[in-house]
Image (cartoon, grey):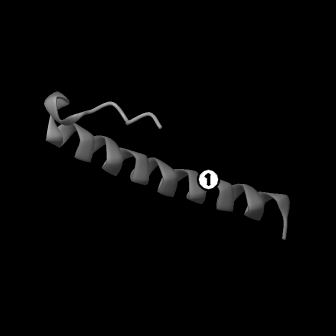
Amino acid sequence: MSKIKLLLDVVSDLRALADSVQAVADAIASNGPHEITKPEQQ
C-alpha cells in the first residue's frame, strides 16, 4: 500500500475512535454527576 493510503486509513480509524469516545462521553453526561462512583480498591 502507498503511504497516502495508510495515512487515510489512520484518519478513518481516528474518526471512528472519536465517534466512540463521543458516545461514551454523552452516555456519562446523560447519567449526571451523581451517578459517578469511585472504583472499589482490592
Please give left or right for residue 7 compared with residue 36 in the image: right
Check the image and name the residue furthest to the bottom: 1
Residue 23, how many percent across, how many down? 32, 50
Looking at the image, which residue is at 49% across and 57% down? 16
How many neighbours does mark 1 have within 10 angstroms: few (below 14), some (14-19), or many (20 or more)? Answer: few
Height in image: 36 above or below 6? above
Check the image and name the residue furthest to the right: 2
- Give 19 or 27, whichever is nearer the viewer: 27
Height in image: 3 above or below 24? below
Exactly how many numbered labels are in the figure? 1
Looking at the image, which residue is at 18% across and 36% down? 35
Height in image: 16 above or below 34? below
Looking at the image, which residue is at 46% across and 47% down? 18
Secondary structure beneath label 1: helix
- Give 39 or 23, whichever is nearer the viewer: 39
Residue 3, how many percent across, how many down? 83, 58
Give the image quarter of residue 6.
bottom right
Looking at the image, which residue is at 41% across and 53% down? 20
Please give left or right for residue 40 compared with residue 27 in the image: right
Q: Quadrant of the N terminus?
A: bottom right
Check the image and name the residue furthest to the front: 42
Q: Which residue is mark 1?
A: 11
- Give 17 or 12, whichever is nearer the viewer: 17
Please give left or right for residue 38 compared with residue 31 in the image: right
- Give 12 or 31, whichever is nearer the viewer: 31
Residue 11, how many percent across, how many down? 61, 53
Name the residue type under label 1. Answer: Val
